[in-house]
Amino acid sequence: MPSKIRDSIDEALADINDGATVMIGGFGLAGQPSELIDGLIRREAKNLTIVNNNAGNGDVGLALLIKSGFVKKIICSFPRQVDSHHFDEKYHAGEIELEVVPQGNLAERIRAAGAGIGGFFTPTGYGTLLAEGKETRVIEGKNYVLESPIHADFALIKAYKADPLGNLVYRKTARNFGPVMATAAQTTIVQVSEVVETGGLDPESVITPGIFVQRIVQVPSTNPKEQQA
Amino acid sequence: MSEKLTRAQMAERVARDIPVGSFVNLGIGIPTSVSNYLTAEQEVTLHTENGMLGMGPEAHGDEIDPDLINAGKIAVTELPGASYFHHADSFAMMRGGHLDIAVLGAFQVSAQGDLANWHTGAKDAIPAVGGAMDLAVGAKDVFVIMELTTKEGKSKLVQQVTYPVTGLGCVTRVYTEVAIFDLDHGHVTVTDLFGEASLESLRELTGIALLDGTEN
């Protein structure tokens, strides 16, 4: 199998075009592929739909992508935070569309897309504003809401180590959305701190099997804890 | 006559009521401080929905690792026996009925156990839900910690919630500074009273036919 390692971020992102739906991993800044996002900003693809748990923190990564004006719509669970000023500004100016999804439904809708599930009934959100207009069903006496899968053209995620086949391991709570997003996109692009040779990862420890990964870029880590490990 | 409970004492009461060996998720704010009062003997495992079981105390100084945070995005530590997992698994733990207790804050709770804690309903507010709806319907028990009244003196324990609902019929216990309430299919029982509150005064304040479950 040809190696999935790419020499540069710009090369790895070269076919992300206007109107793409892009999943971006991370919960807050943990697991956020900041360097890939910087590359996406350089790419200047417009009218993007972004899927992430949040809507950017501070002045890095996703927050800067939103500030750039390239994002038409964001699908997320928790946009409003103390340091989400770039999103807040765009939202109040009417310059960005927002779809708020309960966090577990967000994860499950992404998982469903990656697993080829056409929809699922979930108790989460039943009877709330976020289920308005959605089909409901009583199953064994309990109320459920029909939710649909979320597919993406691209997923940009961050992992800890990869081999050239795309097998991935993650680090602590930086794992978060990475494994499910990797399954739900046509093309999954991963930034990792370390690339090991094929056979260098314990098969029992692989979290994301390489079948879900198309491209890998090595980006040195700035996390001192990781460097100590 | 006892004094009204402080926030710390409310958190301490919740901690005391968590059964040995429980899997527990603590919401952001006062609920997080419940962990300060859990004892080693309780052997409680803390879940954080961003993907960890066996969460330890907040990290300080050298312990801080940007890859290890809780749902409030605060740096935390891991305890021996901790595990990490992805988001879909983390929420399956709730939805699938594996999590024993979620401790949450609230704007309002109804006598039927309906919870409102995600949205004030204000038109210009940016809606943000996070894991609140998943926790509300997923945990076997939902304990709420809140002040009983708003700044205007209105009860937050009500017949019908007026704020946008987070989950229906999910709250099983409410801890406030003046009383603890048990909720069971529309029956609300006062189990503890603090300060000068009486059953009568609370019935008047809440408009709910509160049952007397106090022992003395």
Image (spheres, helix red, strand yellow):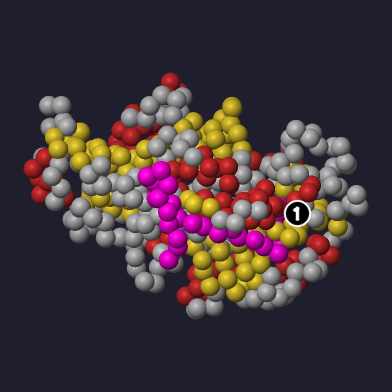
Expressed as whole percent of the image width and height from the top left, the position of residue B141 reads 37, 38
User: Residue drawn 75% across and 33% down?
Assistant: A204
Q: Which residue is mark 1?
A: A190
Q: Nearer the viewer, residue A181 or B32?
A: A181
- Residue A201 in sight from this viewpoint: yes
Which residue appears at 83% of the width and 44% of the height?
A163
What residue is drawn where x is 84% and y is 61%? A8
In this view, the residue in front, B133 or B147, is B133
- A29 vs B208, nearest the viewer: B208
Residue sticking out furthest to the top: B41
Q: Tell me if I can see residue A77 in this picture.
A: no
Q: Is residue B202 left or right of residue A186?
A: left
Q: Is residue B187 above or below residue A61?
A: above
Task: Name the amino acid, label 1.
Answer: Val
In the figure, is residue A3 to the left or right of B14? right
Magenta extent: A133-158
Quadrant showing the C terminus of chain A: top right
Q: Is residue A22 above or below residue A178?
A: below
